[in-house]
Image (cartoon, grey):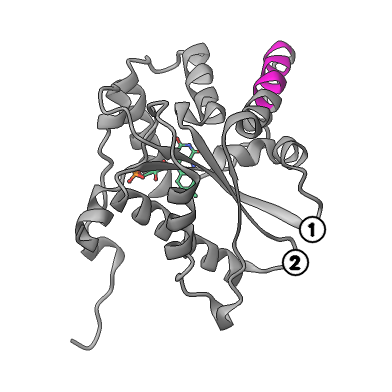
Amino acid sequence: MKLDDAIAGRRSMREFLPDPVPQGTVHRILEIASRAPSGTNIQPWKVIVVTGDDQAKVTKAIMDYRLEEAKADAPKDTKMPRRWAEPYLSRRRKVGYDMYAKLGIEKGDKPAMWAQHGRNYEFFGAPVGLFFVVDEDLDQASWLDLGMFMQNVMLVAKQEGLDTCPQGAFLHYADLVHAALGLDDTQRLASGMSLGVADMSAPVNSLETERVAVDEFSDFRGF
Ligand SMILES: Cc1cc2nc3c(=O)[nH]c(=O)nc-3n(C[C@H](O)[C@H](O)[C@H](O)COP(=O)(O)O)c2cc1C
C-alpha cells in the first residue's frame, strides 16, 4: 500500500465486526509504529492492549458509571464544557452534524446522542482496544511524540487491512480506566483507540470528513 493511500484511506470507523485480531498482528503494528521519531529518542509511549475479559472490564466500569450518571443527570462528559473559538467551533459542529445525519439521529435528540456516545466505551464493537499512556511528569514534547506514534499505529493498521478510531472520549472517565487497567498515578491516559475490521455496511462508516485547503493553513514564504 502506498503511503498516500494509507493516509488518505484512513478514516475513523465507528462500527466494527467482531472478527478477532490476533495478538501477533497487533504486536507487528506496534513494532513498526515504534519507528516513530521522538525527541532525543526517549520513546515515551506506553500502550495497554486489551481484548476479551480485560476489554470488557473497562467497558463495564464505564457503562455502569454512565447509567448512574444518567440517573443523577450529571454526566462527567458534560462537566465544564470547553469554549471553542472559530474556526474550530464550526468544524466541530460540521463533523458532529454529518455523523449524526449518517446515524439518522435528529439534532437535539439527546437520548439517542447519549447512547451513540456510549458506543465509544464499547469500542464500537471492535475486538481490540488500545490505551496510550505517558508518564505524568513528561511535557508536551512527549505528547507530540505520542501523537506521531499513534498516527503510525493507525496507518500500519490500515496497511494490515484493519481500521481504527482514536478516542479521546475515554479521558472523560480516565479515573475508571486507570482503575480497570491497574494504572498508578505516575501514568497519564492520553487516548484510547478501537482496532478491528470495520463494518462497511454500517452507515456511520461512510462518513468522509472534510479538510480545509492547504492555502488556508499554510503560509509559504521566500519561494
Ligand atoms: C486525539 C483524537 C481523539 C478523538 N476522539 C474521538 C472519540 O472519542 N470518539 C470518536 O468517535 N472519534 C474521535 N476522534 C476522531 C475524530 O473525530 C476524527 O479524527 C475527525 O473527525 C476526522 O475524521 P477522520 O479520522 O475520519 O479523518 C478523535 C480523533 C483524535 C485525533
Which quadrant of the structure image shows residue 5? Answer: bottom left
Q: Residues within 10 Å of mark 2 (few under 14, many from 20)?
A: few
Residue 211 among those drawn in magenta: no
Q: Which residue is mark 2?
A: 137
Label located before the other in sequence (2 or 1)? 2
Q: Nearer the viewer, residue 213 or 204?
A: 204
- Residue at the right extreme of this rendering: 185
Q: What span is colored magenta in the figure?
A: 62-71
Instruction: Judge whether 28 appears above or below 108 on screen.
Output: below
SS label for mark 2: loop
Q: Which residue is mark 1?
A: 186
* Position of residue 112 in the picture relative to residue 156 (left or right): right
- What percent of the width, then of the height, locates residue 210? 26, 44
Q: Are marks 2 and 1 in contact (CB under 8 Å)?
A: yes
* Position of residue 98 in the picture relative to residue 122 (left or right): left
Give the quadrant of the N terminus: bottom left
Q: Which of labels 2 and 1 is toward the front?
A: 1
Ligand 1 under 8 Å from disc 1 Cβ: no
Q: Residues within 10 Å of mark 1 (few under 14, many from 20)?
A: few
Which residue is located at x 43 percent, y 49 percent? Answer: 25
* Position of residue 219 in the picture relative to residue 54 (left or right): left
At label 1, the amino acid type is Thr
Q: Nearer the viewer, residue 62 or 76?
A: 62
Which quadrant of the structure image shows residue 207? Answer: top left
Which residue is located at x 70 percent, y 38 percent? Answer: 177
Which residue is located at x 71 percent, y 11 percent? Answer: 71
- Magenta segment, prevailing SS (helix, strand or loop): helix
- What percent of the width, then of the height, locates residue 107? 39, 18
